[in-house]
């Protein structure tokens, strides 16, 4: 046990990435306070309670991003807060209510509580490449994307990419609030996250692969970039454990083509014919140069894309989700 006794909080703990953060934290000996919207909802909590070490060192707390002060009980006495909760969807009827308010006001709600709780030494927030990839000058093959690259909220709004707007505004507000209130904030910016699921149901990013297999996806991108959920979870923890960690950390992989993905899907579903149906519809741009040196400096060794895809499909089959 590397860090026995240290108490930390994970917000939105039942989610795909957060569940892996909780698992790795428990493995490393931490005591984890996990916030969920409904601690009595077994579908959201059973997989967490079944984790190794959970019986002794995991406690669930009820909290909602839109409920001011609801994170206070969970954060009280914690040394670190991993703020991961945020709605993840590209289809909404009211983007302000469903995406932007919970992302932005929710982040300020969590950070506001952190300023009141003197035990909190660092906040690690899950942002996204969405908050990186839409600068004023559009990306291109020679554009080097690194941690200095910020999405422009107006650019994302003009494209009506409301999830992208929500993540961009939430990160912008987090930096502003942290600076004004002396919070030690570190931000993780993952690309499309894939890999095995711990939770029993599909989350948005993994559903893209499930839909592909179920032949439901008619906007298959010709190219993608993806990153393994286990690497993303570890990056969050290293960002807390490394005293010198600071600023943002981009974590995403090299470009994979639909043919690369098809090759791996075929190992499991030889009869499937994945057609590149919509070559032009890359919602998130992928053609740019990428620097992940900063994430590597945390000691992250990137899982090869093929292994991530294989493990995603194995997990989907195991959980009867395809
Ligand atoms: N997956 C990716 O490809 C990816 C890439 C980059 C960044 N991210 C970021 O990573 C974080 C986690 O995403 P994920 O992929 O793990 O998705 P997820 O499984 O959908 O997790 C999202 C979590 O946020 C919680 N949440 C949503 N609205 C909430 C509210 N009003 N109050 C409290 N909790 C709320 C959800 O709770 P319920 O379970 O109750 O709905 C869920 O636990 C998000 O911040 C997302 O933007 C994800």
Image (tube, grey):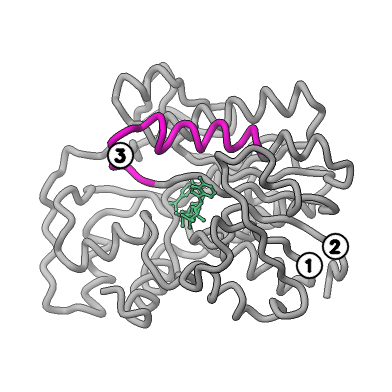
What residue lies at 73% left-to-right and 43% top-to-bottom? 123
| Secondary structure under the numbered disc 3 in the rendered image | loop
Camera-nearest residue between 214 and 83: 83
Q: Based on the displayed image, in which of its 4 quarters is residue 288 positioned?
A: top left
Q: CA distance from mark 1 to mark 2?
A: 5 Å
Residue 12 pos. (x, y %): 57, 54
- 3 vs 2, front mark: 3
How crowded pointer 2 is (Cα within 10 Å; few <14, some 14-19, many 20+) is rated as some
First reached walking from the N terminus: tag 1 or tag 2: 2
Query: Which residues fall within the magenta stretch?
Result: 89-109
Q: Is residue 263 magenta?
A: no
Q: Main secondary structure of the magenta part?
A: helix
First reached walking from the N terminus: tag 3 or tag 2: 2
* Numbered badge on residue 92: 3
Q: Is residue 79 left or right of residue 248?
A: right
The mark tally for this picture is 3
What residue lies at 69% left-to-right and 35% top-to-bottom? 247
* Numbered badge on residue 30: 1
Residue 261 pos. (x, y %): 27, 63
Residue 237 pos. (x, y %): 70, 57
Q: Is residue 108 magenta?
A: yes
Q: Is residue 128 visible?
A: yes
Quarter of the image that includes the C terminus = bottom left
Pointers 1 and 2 in contact (C-beta within 8 Å): yes
* Numbered badge on residue 6: 2
How crowded pointer 1 is (Cα within 10 Å; few <14, some 14-19, many 20+) is rated as many
Pointers 3 and 2 in contact (C-beta within 8 Å): no
């Amino acid at each position: 046990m590397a860090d026995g006794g240290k108490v930390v909080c994970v917000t939105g703990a039942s989610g795909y990435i957060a569940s892996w953060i909780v698992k790795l934290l428990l493995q490393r000996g931490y005591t984890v306070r996990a916030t969920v919207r409904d601690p009595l909802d077994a579908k959201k909590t059973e997989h967490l309670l079944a984790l190794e070490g959970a019986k002794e060192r995991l406690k669930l707390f009820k909290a909602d991003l839109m409920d001011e002060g609801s994170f206070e009980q969970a954060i009280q006495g914690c040394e670190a807060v991993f703020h991961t909760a945020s709605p993840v969807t590209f289809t909404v009827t009211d983007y302000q209510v469903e995406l932007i308010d919970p992302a932005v006001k929710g982040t300020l709600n969590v950070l506001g509580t952190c300023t009141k709780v003197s035990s909190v030494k660092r906040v690690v927030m899950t942002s996204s490449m969405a908050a990186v990839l839409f600068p004023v000058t559009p990306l291109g093959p020679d554009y080097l994307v690194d941690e200095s690259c910020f999405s422009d909220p107006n650019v994302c709004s003009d494209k009506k990419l409301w999830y992208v707007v929500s993540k961009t505004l939430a990160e912008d507000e987090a930096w502003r609030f942290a600076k004004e209130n002396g919070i030690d904030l570190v931000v993780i910016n993952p690309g499309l996250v894939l890999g095995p699921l711990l939770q029993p149901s599909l989350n948005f990013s993994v559903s893209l692969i499930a839909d592909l297999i179920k032949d439901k996806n008619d906007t298959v991108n010709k190219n993608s970039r993806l990153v393994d959920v286990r690497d993303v979870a570890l990056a969050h923890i290293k960002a807390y454990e490394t005293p010198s960690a600071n600023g943002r950390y981009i974590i995403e992989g090299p470009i994979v083509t639909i043919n690369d993905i098809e090759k791996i899907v075929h190992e499991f579903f030889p009869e499937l014919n994945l057609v590149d149906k919509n070559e032009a519809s890359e919602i998130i741009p992928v053609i740019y140069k990428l620097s992940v040196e900063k994430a590597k400096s945390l000691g992250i060794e990137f899982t090869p894309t093929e292994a991530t895809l294989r493990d995603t499909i194995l997990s989907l089959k195991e959980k009867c989700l395809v």
